[in-house]
Amino acid sequence: MNSYSWSLEKIRSNLRTLQKERIVLEESDISEQIRVFQLFIDSLKAMPTEGTKFLFQPYSFEDYKELNKDQYSEILRTLKSDFDVKWRPNKHILKGKDQKNRNTTWWSDQVKPGKDFYWKQFKENYLDEKFNLNIVNTINIDSDSIVNQLGNPDDEEFERYGMVVGHVQAGKTGNYSSVICKAADAGYKFIVVLSGTNSNLLRNQTQERINESFIGQNDDGLCGVGLGHKREHKDIPFRMTSDFLDFNKMTANSLVGANFDTMNVPIALVIKKNATNLKSLIKWLTDQYKDIIAKHSMLMIDDESDYASVNTKAEDNPATINSQIRQLIALFGKSCYVAYTATPSANIFIDHEAETPTLGKDLFPKDFIFPLDTPDNYVGATKIFNNPQGNYLVTIADNENIIPTRHKSDFIPRQLPNSLKDSIRLFIINVAIRNLRGQSGKHNSMMVHVSLNTEVHKTIFSLVETYVGDIKKAVKAYGLLSNYEAQSDIFIDLKTTFSKHLKNNVEFNWEKVLTEINNSLESIIYRQVHKDTKIPLIYKDNDPINVIVVGGLSLARGFTLEGLSVSYFIRSTLLNDTLMQMARWFGYRDGYTDLCKIYMTPDLQDSYKHIEYATDQLFDTFQQMVDAGKTPEDYGLYVIEDPENALQITAKNKRKHAFSKYLNINLTGKLYETIKIYKENDSKLKDNIVVMKDFVNKLINGQEKNIDKQSNDSNFILWKNINKKYVINFLEEFKVAENSNILKHSISNRMPMDFLQPFVKQHDENWDICLYGGKGKYFELNKNYKIKLQQRTIVSKPTDDDQKYREIGTRRQISSGISESKNLPIEVQKQLKDDRVGARAFKGRNNLLMLHLIESKEDTKELIAAFGVSISGDGISGGKNTKILMNKVMATIEYIQSEEVEIEL
């Protein structure tokens, strides 16, 4: 261990102690601990050197090299990624009708001593070493919530079907590893993880992670959780699959001692969704244990469940993989099937009524849907494709004549595009910078994904290998010379790449980076990932690699490229979910986020922006369903398709139970207000007051120069020409009341969030924002600003199911006629008076976000936050047909009689 590493671990240890008191640490806490450590070093300077050997194990003070400013900056960067990361547990569990009547606290209510063996080891030996306490707590709470939804192994019989929806590369494996550990502690005997299809790459990586997190043993002996407590052999789960060997006939014949009745440990296997492998497993279980396993409990984790698991054929003759999964579930009298996916469209289009006598129910998540949130250090679609600075994207514009996006199967590329060469040079530079930052013990990867065709991969791989070889030769020959640029144009190209992408973003100058390139370049290796791969791609914790990976389909789903910083991507598809799963660059890039670049064509960038909108809309729908108390079986789901984009939500054979409808969506020239509000004493009413107050204070503090006016009687505050990001953030934070979705029941007086949020994101116009006052008591926004509350009658209304909801006002409107003209010149306001339509149609008027703080006339202590949006335009232009794809549940409830519906929003 060198001086830098020792110092880092010393400060990290102090922070871990501090975190036990505070849970979440801020950057100031980390900076303070670094300062305390520096004082500690200074105090040692004044001490006699004798005796410091003990303090500085394994150093004497003479051996310790004091760190410089750059090294302390890197320690701060590293520790921020360890400790200054926040993650909230999910509170939105969508439960089925039967599930609501079951005990769904059976696991969390248990007294755990002696019953949390596997989870405790996973937490203490793995999670606590890798993540801060806030993240570990969130993983713990989320996995508790999911296990609560499973059946209790002590019950006589049960079956559960659920789905966990996460974001791509956002920690689903860590979540289901936690679920597996807790399920094993609860008494689940047989645990199956379905991972990958034909390629072994994903299955093997998943096996490695289950070995590390749960089993504690791999082919070489104890590993992961098994090392920390030196797990005894009697406590090691029985593995039916190994590091590189899937379940097959040979495995079945070699299994000795896997007896359900006599074994005291859980049995676990990681198996591909492959017809031969699944058939072998079903046969082995049926032949050996048909009369026994029915009384045992089985947990099946279906990773990437939208792929291969969904029935793409007729229900009376289902697709092979779907049929085999259902056969396997049917063998057990106590079974739980939990689908994990980042692209759930195919799953929600499963026929929720499908069932056969022999196979049982289809895989629709009838019992629960659990959306996973992401930590604030997650790099996902929003950060990459909705980032005004455009820090991550590099546009490819030179590929079509060299590697066309669409090409014939016999196409052979002859050279590399300059953009691909630039990306390779950037990766070489990134490896050097990460080494300079003290990250030489971490993996570094680059992905090249240009085709579905294996022969294209082979040729590209050869061209990449040759190009990097040329760079290695030049650097080895001339890299240490003072006049290196005169010796080879490669040095000019490297420096140009550095200047273009990183010069103003990193802490090192070019000369220092080049020196490290000289040291690190020979460590770069290459791997092909496709069906003919000879040398596998393997990441080992104790053997970091710097690798350029060329591949296609095998890289497109589930597999994690460790330390991915550069992606070159021109592969195209017309399927939303497939395109999203190809995005291996999503994930966590702590300590090197500023180095990450994605090379991509403009068309692909547009497609990903559309997918980001659709994904956000689906997650918002899950939340709305939970807020409304709905279930997967009685509330429909739909996904918006953009008619201006050729992308399809998912493959046609996965949506044969989906129904397409065309809605004529025209937001322009309209007013939408949050007329509906939550019932009395709902905590979300208070949450919205906080959201409104915080939002207004952000505007006051950050946009003070844009405050147009505040009248003497505190009647309103107006902000002009505000960036749309403020509006986007507000719409994301504000909780719109249940049943406000425009595709449910009456369409009048709704806030069409599913369409409004994409509308705001897709239009670059600035907004005006107005906070309106009234005649009520004063409400203090901050020490300098206050406003009088508006007063409104709050009306309770019955719903179809005899519950109550409430509306603001008796005339189904919040604002007055003149409210929509407040952002127009005074003389125009006088001319228009209460002409709402004329105000919206006034040429050059910005869209207006209208904020209302209201006190109830019936109970002046009750405060209500509401808002409206007044979209400029004439109400005629700007509309377009928007296609939605709805599942069978929603189609039954809504518009099943009509192929097209015209909705005037």
Image (spheres, rainbow, N blue to C red):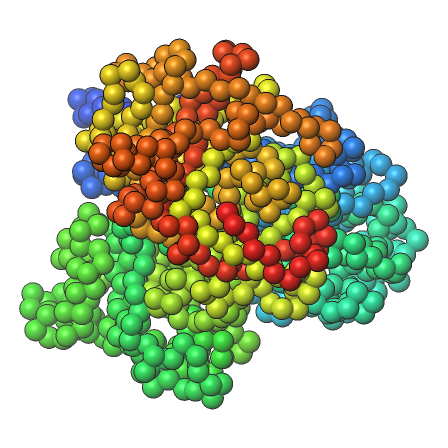
**How many numbered discs?**
0
Residue located 60% across and 52% down the image:
638
Q: Please tell me whether residue 226 is drawn above or below residue 564 in the rendered image.
A: above
Q: Please tell me whether residue 255 is drawn above or below residue 175 in the rendered image.
A: below
On the image, which quarter does residue 801 sit in? top right
Q: Please tell me whether residue 455 is drawn above or below residue 836 in the rendered image.
A: below
Q: What is the residue that sits farthest to the right in this orientation?
A: 291
Q: Quadrant of the N terminus?
A: top left
On the image, which quarter does residue 714 sit in? top left
On the image, which quarter does residue 662 sit in? bottom right
Estimate the x, y position of residue 391 in percent, counting from the top left: 28, 53
Left or right of residue 27: residue 802 = right
Residue located 38% across and 42% down the image:
837
Left or right of residue 802: residue 73 = left
Left or right of residue 346: residue 58 = left
Q: Is residue 170 visible?
A: no
Q: What is the residue that sits farthest to the bottom in this orientation?
A: 410
Estimate the x, y position of residue 318 in percent, counting from the top left: 77, 67
Residue located 36% across and 12% down the image:
778
Q: Is residue 597 visible?
A: yes
In-front residue for pair 850/410 = 850
Residue located 84% across and 51% down the image:
332
In-front residue for pair 685/132 = 685
In-front residue for pair 286/366 = 366
Estimate the x, y position of residue 373 in percent, counting from the top left: 52, 41
Estimate the x, y position of residue 566 in percent, counting from the top left: 35, 61
Q: Please tell me whether residue 119 is drawn above or below residue 709 in the rendered image.
A: below
